[in-house]
Structure formats: structure tokens, C-alpha cells
Image: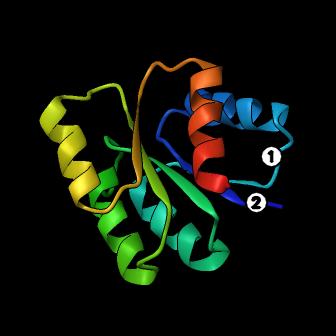
Amino acid sequence: MSKILIADDASFMRLMIGQILARKGLTNVIVAENGRQAVERYKVEKPDLTFLDITMPEIDGLTALAEILVIDPLAKVIMCSAVAHENMVEDALKRGAIDFIIKPFRPDEFLRVVSKHLS
């Protein structure tokens, strides 16, 4: 069963993403409230797919991305943000993110991205 890490400082986003994933039978979900927790949970859990919000306390999503890629250069990390300037998306992808989802997103759009990267 695929293990998915969701890191977002907004509890409603963590809950919503978890519910969307559960509809597809993806219930092995780990959550983090900030970038530091995301890195620590990644070390322990080694998820198959990670979602990082860009704007989070302690360390931001781009810093967490860099730290996760040091731990596991093959990590599959998808960035999520409501602030998605073209240069921000390009920067995240250049830094090693495999995809970028702009909030708010539709559940079907989110699941399409998940399916694309879990297969």
C-alpha cells in the first residue's frame, strides 16, 4: 500500500487531502504541520509520495524539499501552493519537485496527479 506524506500548516487542507485520498483507497497517510515536521516524518516513514505546501512555519516547503532530497535523492515530492507565480513553479521544479499543484484544486485534478506519480 502506498504511503503518502501531507505537509501543510492548515489543518483543513491536511484533512481535505486525506479525505480525497481515502476515496481512492489511499489511507496510509502521514501528516505534518510544518516543514520541519515534514522532514522528520520523511526520515522515519519514507513515503512513496510527499505533498509540501510552500508557505509553512519553521521551514518553508522549498527548504523542506531540499532537505528531503538530501535524505533521498529519488523522493517524489509535489509542491502545493495558493501562490503560484510562474517563476515559483519553475523554481520548485528546478529544485527537484516532480510536480506542482495550485490551490484551490478540484479533487479529480488532485487524484490525476497522484495517479500519475504513484504508477
The C terminus sits in image quarter: bottom right
* Res 64 quadrant in image: bottom left
> Does residue 119 appear to the left or right of 104 in the view shown?
right
Q: Residues within 10 Å of mark 2 (few under 14, many from 20)?
A: few
User: Reading the chain from its start, which is encountered first: label 1 or label 2?
Assistant: 2
Q: Residue furthest left?
A: 87
Residue 18: x, y in percent? 71, 37
Q: In the rendered view, would you say 109 is above or below 56?
A: above
At 50% from the left edge and 62% from the top edge, which residue is drawn?
Answer: 76
> Does residue 86 appear to the left or right of 16 in the view shown?
left
> Does residue 77 appear to the left or right of 19 in the view shown?
left
Check contact, mark 1 vs mark 2: CB within 8 A.
yes
At 46% from the left edge and 18% from the top edge, which residue is drawn?
Answer: 104
At 13% from the left edge and 38% from the top edge, which residue is drawn?
Answer: 87
Q: Residues within 10 Å of mark 1 (few under 14, many from 20)?
A: some
How far apart in space, not on screen, are marks 1 and 2 (Cα)?
Answer: 7 Å
Q: Nearer the viewer, residue 16 or 101?
A: 101
Q: Secondary structure at mark 2?
A: loop
Q: Nearer the viewer, residue 114 or 16?
A: 114
Q: Which residue is mark 2?
A: 2
Q: Secondary structure at mark 1?
A: loop
The N terminus sits in image quarter: bottom right
Q: Tag 1: residue type?
A: Leu
At 35% from the left edge and 62% from the top edge, which residue is drawn?
Answer: 65
Residue 109: x, y in percent? 57, 25
Q: Which residue is mark 1?
A: 26
Q: Tag 2: residue type?
A: Ser
